[in-house]
Image: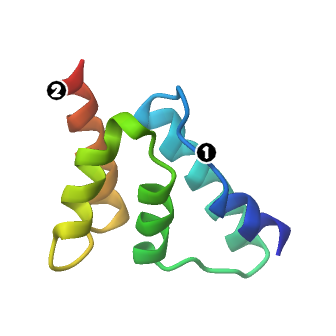
Amino acid sequence: MVLKEKLKTIKMGNDSAAGYLTKITNVRDELAVVGEVIPPTELVRIAVNGLSCSWMNFADGVCARETLPTWERFWDDCIQTEIRKG
């Protein structure tokens, strides 16, 4: 339960998109080791909720989609957005 709370409280802060998403992925993998599987859509929701204020337009766009992207697609979209923000 502690790991699940840790996952939900990860925030982007000043991290790069890759750094932020890696933190989330690491905790997801730790949870998998103890048999707790986090569905990809929940992982995307958690990641969107932890994005910094400068990413709110991106977050709004993700939430406006009819269906949430896969974790891999979300990761790619974040990296592309960061490159464009560059």
Location of residue 27 in the rendering, given as x and y in whole percent from the top left corner: 68, 57
**Label 2: how many residues lie within 10 Å, few (<14), some (14-19) or many (20+)?**
few
Mark 1: secondary structure: helix
Location of residue 79 in the rendering, given as x and y in whole percent from the top left corner: 29, 37
Mark drawn on residue 46: none
Tell me: residue 16, above or below residue 61: above
The residue that label 2 is drawn on is: 84
For the residues labelled 1 and 2, the Cα–Cα distance comes to 22 Å
Query: Which image quadrant: the N terminus?
Result: bottom right
Q: Residue furthest right?
A: 2
Depth check, mark 1 against mark 2: the one in front is 2
**Image quadrant in which you'd find residue 45:** bottom left
Q: Amino acid at mark 2?
A: Arg
**Image quadrant in which you'd find residue 69:** bottom left
Instruction: Write the residue at 66% across / 60% down.
Output: 7
Residue 40 as seen in the image, left or right of residue 8: left
Q: Residue furthest top?
A: 86
Query: Which image quadrant: the C terminus?
Result: top left
Please name whichever residue, 61 or 79, is drawn nearer the observer in this view of the structure: 61
Comes first in the chain, label 1 or label 2: 1
The residue that label 1 is drawn on is: 23
Tell me: residue 23, above or below residue 69: above
Q: How many marks?
A: 2
